[in-house]
Structures are given as C-alpha cells and as structure tokens.
Image (spheres, rainbow, N blue to C red):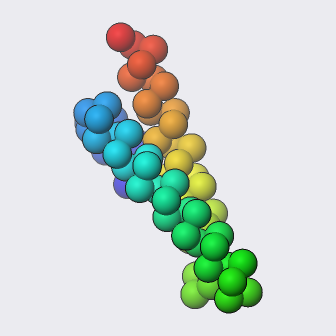
Amino acid sequence: MKAHELRDLSLAELQARLKDEKEALVNFRFNKAIAGQIENPARIKNTRREIARLNLIINEKLGAE
C-alpha cells in the first residue's frame, strides 16, 4: 500500500496493520530458518519497508495531535 493511501487510514487501523506486518515478518524469518529458503526472498525486504512506512505515518499522526 502506498504512503498516501495509508495516511487516509485511522490510527487504530494503522496499528492493526503494523501488528499484522510484524507477525508476517516473524513468520518469514522462521520459515527461512527452518527450511533454509523461502519462496520469495524479496517479501522480507518489502515487509520491512512496509513496517517502516507504517511506523513513520503513525508517528506523523501522533505528532499532529
């Protein structure tokens, strides 16, 4: 999801998405450790970027209050 689309979401929705992305990252890392390889290694990088994007927007919204 693009940053401008995320800015339209509420704070609760952003925090829920952040939780989901963090869980997905843990699962990717776990699967990589167990299986030695994953289907799409770029997903880890994209998930980390999505987490950073969500954190940035959450902090922007908290700072604006």
Question: Is 26 placed above or below 53 here?
Answer: below
Horizontal arrangement in the rendering, residue 53 relative to residue 44 (left or right): left
- Where is residue 39, by image quadrant? bottom right
In this view, the residue farthest toward the top is 65
Image position, residue 9 (x, y; %): 26, 38
Question: Is 34 placed above or below 8 here?
Answer: below
Asked if residue 41 shows in the view, the reply is: no
Horizontal arrangement in the rendering, residue 20 relative to residue 11 (left or right): right
- 25 or 30, which lies in front? 30
Q: Residue at x 44, y 47 (%)?
A: 18
Image position, residue 30 (x, y; %): 63, 73
Image position, residue 55 (x, y; %): 51, 37
Asked if residue 3 shows in the view, the reply is: yes
Quarter of the picture holding the C terminus: top left
Q: Residue at x 45, y 14 (%)?
A: 63
Quarter of the picture holding the N terminus: bottom left
- Where is residue 60, by image quadrant? top left
Image position, residue 26 (x, y; %): 58, 63
Q: Residue at x 63, y 63 (%)?
A: 45
Question: Is 3 placed above or below 49 here?
Answer: above
Q: How many marks?
A: 0
Question: Is 53 placed above or below 23 here?
Answer: above
